[in-house]
Image (cartoon, helix red, strand yellow):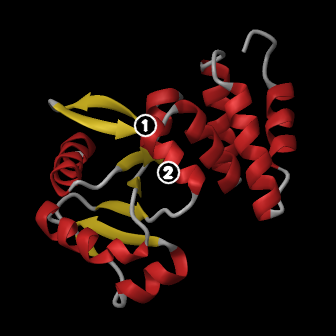
Amino acid sequence: MFSKLLARLARELDRAGIAYMVIGGQAVQLYGEPRMTRDIDVTLGLDATGLDRVTALCRSVGLRVLVNDPARFVRDTMVLPAVEDASGIKVDFVFSFSAYERQALGRSRPVEINGQPVRYSSLEDLLIHKLVAGRARDIEDTRLILAKNPNWDRPYVERWLSELDRALSLDLKTRLRDLLRSLPPSA
């Protein structure tokens, strides 16, 4: 079910000329370990002014928008939630606007799914997304990804974590350092 919807989404996003990357649980499965996820998270190369393009894309893919006032919801959250009623799969479209997100979109990589290239977040950008989210599930995902992928671009991740620490008043570099200390020496 997920693979068919991912392929359709990718095809329509490409057709519409919208840059995107799959993040969240679907990307964790690519870099970490298989786990149960009930949704698809997609970062878009559009800010909220592209909402009409995304709602049109939802219709073409067969998704139903889940909020009554999409413009207000996107303005407040930068996310447009939708669902494919036939499968019950939820899709969250995340609108972007920062220099970091633009760079991350450019670093995304295609993975073939059902004969369709689907753009996934790079491993490093997925680590950054997960560290920023910071929920218990995100921290565990980060731990699994780090343990399974010892050769990642640490300077790139640390540079963006420093930028985000300043912008968001977080302590992401410490979160990463603590996670790295908790890994077995071979990771």
Q: Residue at x 43, y 37 (%)?
A: 108
Q: Residue at x 80, y 28 (%)?
A: 180
Q: Amino acid at mark 1?
A: Ser
Q: Amino acid at mark 2?
A: Arg
Gap between marks 1 and 2 measured at Cα? 10 Å
Q: Quadrant of residue 27?
A: top left
Point out residue 75 in the picture as x, y percentages from the top left corner: 48, 82
Q: Residue at x 86, y 35 (%)?
A: 178
- Observer-nearest residue: 30 or 105? 105
Point out residue 85 in the picture as x, y percentages from the top left corner: 20, 67
Residue pushed farthest front?
99
The residue that label 2 is drawn on is 102
Q: Which mark is residue 126?
A: none
Q: Quadrant of residue 53?
A: bottom left
The residue that label 1 is drawn on is 108
Relative vertical location of residue 109 with respect to residue 71 in this rendering, above or below? above
- Observer-nearest residue: 48 or 170? 48
